Amino acid sequence: MALSFDLTNEQKLIRDSVRAFAEQEIRPQAHELDRTETFSTELTKGMGDLGLFGMTVSPDYGGAGMDYVSYIIAVEELARVDGSQAATLAAHNSLGAGPIFYFGSEEQKKRYLPRLCTGEYVWAFGLTEPEAGSDAGGTKTTAKNENGKWVINGSRVFITNASCSASLGATVQAVSGTRPDGKKEYTCFLLEKGTPGYETKKMTDKLLWRSSDTAELYFKDVALSDAQVLGKPGSGFRQMLETLDAGRLSIAAMGLGCAQGAFELGLKYAKERRQFGKPIATFQANAFKLADMATEIDHARLYLYYACWLKDQNRPYAKESAMAKLYCAEVARMCVTHSLQLHGAYGFMGEYQIERFFRDQKLLEVGEGTSEIQRLVISRAIGCYE
């Protein structure tokens, strides 16, 4: 398949439909949901009604069976208005339903995916621990096979979509043994909410993504059967790394959408705000800021779509995914900084949306691997380390 710089008619329809939903349904509520730290089941169901949950999941399991570029466009359009709602969708599709679709058994796919493609339920990806963030291999949560049952003990922190009323469960990686080379063996498990010993606690007073659901998870002697092992025992670490490669593309899309939204807010304000008798957009210092923003956004979009195209063609894309995530996050930082500067003192006030964009952007440099970790992944890929 040749690379085209034109979106298909279906991709354009997705972009226009999601943009209309974000403008009409999300934007009017975004400030209040952020202020009250409220996860909206109504907006989540609305995104489900648009077909945004399970976009890349096969129709055999209730999904839409779309390409990854189409999915990324949807995330971008949501993030252009509200990072929290984009985070709900991205975490669910890339990190929640994705591993079940790619690694789950036929029974697991049929059990969970149809419910996870409607917007009525969300699924979490439990990787980060209090002492194991960038060092995912430092996981301390354990899974011991005792009398035909897997017994899980440990905890997780900063997990999206895990504590809200719509949460159906979480995929959790645990140390399940020792490999012949002496290294830890990891296995992933599917934990349904309500399982005895599995508890969740909502995390509040966040700087950003305040209407996205973030939770701490606790496992105390959680007993699971072999049917709740994702794939084969011992394959958990590979599953998590592959999931993160795909997940970085969705975080990159959030960075791109954040940058686009901040640019549009800055341009609109600069054309309306008058000083010295004319719009401040006509001052060269401000016009150059906007020109730089527009240039960087276009470059970020081209590269992100290219990385997604590689994934759709089943080609290696791990390096490109890390590059796209790193670049889009940094473009977003530049755009929200410039846009807030254009707003002047008004940019500090909650009634101006750029204040929320300025806060939300920071997570893009931390979540799904920090910008420093992306540079490490990239430097390894280009041969800096033996």
Image: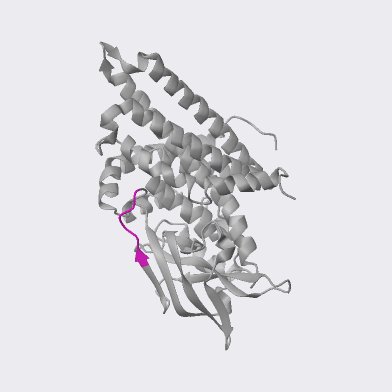
Magenta-colored stretch includes residue 131: no
Q: Is residue 74 visible?
A: no
Q: Nearer the viewer, residue 163 or 279?
A: 279
In this rendering, position of residue 382 left or right of residue 51: right
Residue in the foreground of this view, choosing between 133 and 78: 133
Q: Nearer the viewer, residue 376 or 331?
A: 376
* Residue occupying image coordinates x 46% and y 61%: 124
x%, y% of residue 126?
A: 49, 63
Task: State which region is magenta.
Answer: 201-207
- Measured along the vertical axis of the image, is residue 324 above or below residue 42? above
Q: Is residue 39 above or below residue 352?
A: below
At 61% from the left and 57% from the top, the residue drawn is 241
Residue 271 at least partly seen: yes
Residue 265: x and y in percent read 35, 29
How far from the left and from the top, in percent, is residue 48?
41, 52
Which secondary structure type mostly characterizes the magenta part of the structure?
Answer: loop
